[in-house]
Amino acid sequence: MRLKSALFIFLAIIVPVSQAGATVLKIATLAPDGTSWMNEMRAAGKAIAKRTNNRVELKFYPGGIMGNEKSVMRKIRIGQLHGSALTNAALSKIAQNNQIYSLPMRFKSYEEMNYVRSKLDKVLLDGLKQKGYTAYRIAGDGFSYLLSREPVKNIEDLARQKVWVPKGDVVARAVLEEINVSPVSLPLTDVLTGLQTGLFSTIGSPPVFAIALQWHTKVSYLLDVPLFFTYGALTFSNKSLKKISKADQQVMQEEINNTFKKLNKQNWDNNIKAKQALASQGIKFLQPSKQELAAMQELADKTTNKLIKQGVFSAELVNKVDQLLAEFRKKK
């Protein structure tokens, strides 16, 4: 049975992308089938096919079936795949500053996040295009919160934990290394197994992810402080889009933009509901004291300055984020 499945995937990859006049764009994603993200993307694919009279079709490979993001990027480079839904960590491997919205503890609310994004999303998308990739719009997954098996309310508690960070996430890793924690780095597809086996006991995740991927079944506590903002984009290689007419590319852009606009709103609402669901299922919410919160903020700011010196973030863009935050907070 496994041999047949592997053969099917192999044949699906090597079949020419142009059949009966249709250009088939093969897209990998870690999102499981049946999630709201996949449902919306499949609906966008159908709309694109209908509006282009089936000249353009999107074929999705969900649930990490094409491997982790590093493997997927390799397949895109050699033309086996044409695009992927990439996380902010993977996007930063293409172009610097694509983790800028994940500055630790920089944003206090979705309203702040949305204001800054309205000014800077285009900067990030332009940076990707210059590196050979096209993403029409960014979708926010939500704020990551610390979820743990044991109570974690402060830096001292965190320093005693075995912590997972997403593979390639230099920001989360830098924060932990600042307090002498060596995190376990694994792709999203291996997190549940890591929690089950005790490889680590603490993770950072948007609430909706924690529920959709069943991670919440292996933790008991949530630190109620938004630590990082996580996001992603449906990203195509520029080379793959050259096969498509400008008119049909415009259709793709319109449908994907409309879908991601909807996803941004849905993800915001779903994370609020997911936090409520976690509480109702017995997850205990922890609130740090003012002193503990101040110490966490100091650690976050120290890590940000270190990452600027290392060239992970440009000082200019970080200053721009802070300027926009100051503008927004003044208005409020």
Image (tube, helix red, strand yellow):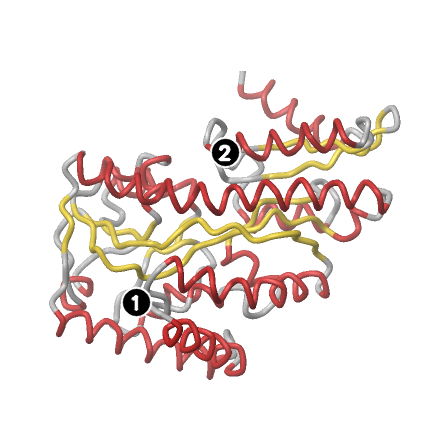
Decide if residue 61 is on the left or right side of residue 291: right
Q: Amino acid at mark 2?
A: Gly
Of residues 224 and 80, the one drawn nearer to the viewer in this rendering: 224
Residue at the (72%, 40%) spot, across then down: 80
Q: Quadrant of the C terminus?
A: bottom left
Residue 260: give x, y in percent of width and height.
56, 45
Of mark 1 and mark 2, the one earlier in the sequence is 2
Q: Secondary structure at mark 2?
A: loop
The residue singled out by tag 1 in the image is 176
Decide if residue 89 is on the left or right side of residue 12: left
Residue 123: give x, y in percent of width and height.
62, 68
Mark 2 crowdedness (10 Å alpha carbons): few <14, some 14-19, many ≥20:
some
Of residues 327 and 290, the one drawn nearer to the viewer in this rendering: 327
Residue at the (50%, 40%) spot, across then down: 30
The residue singled out by tag 2 in the image is 63
Decide if residue 39 is on the left or right side of residue 306: right
Q: Amino acid at mark 1?
A: Leu
Residue at the (50%, 34%) spot, across then down: 63
Mark 1 crowdedness (10 Å alpha carbons): few <14, some 14-19, many ≥20:
many
Of residues 228 and 160, the one drawn nearer to the viewer in this rendering: 228
Residue 115 bears which disc, if any? none
Residue lying at the far front of the rendered structure: 331
Decide if residue 313 is on the left or right side of residue 135: left
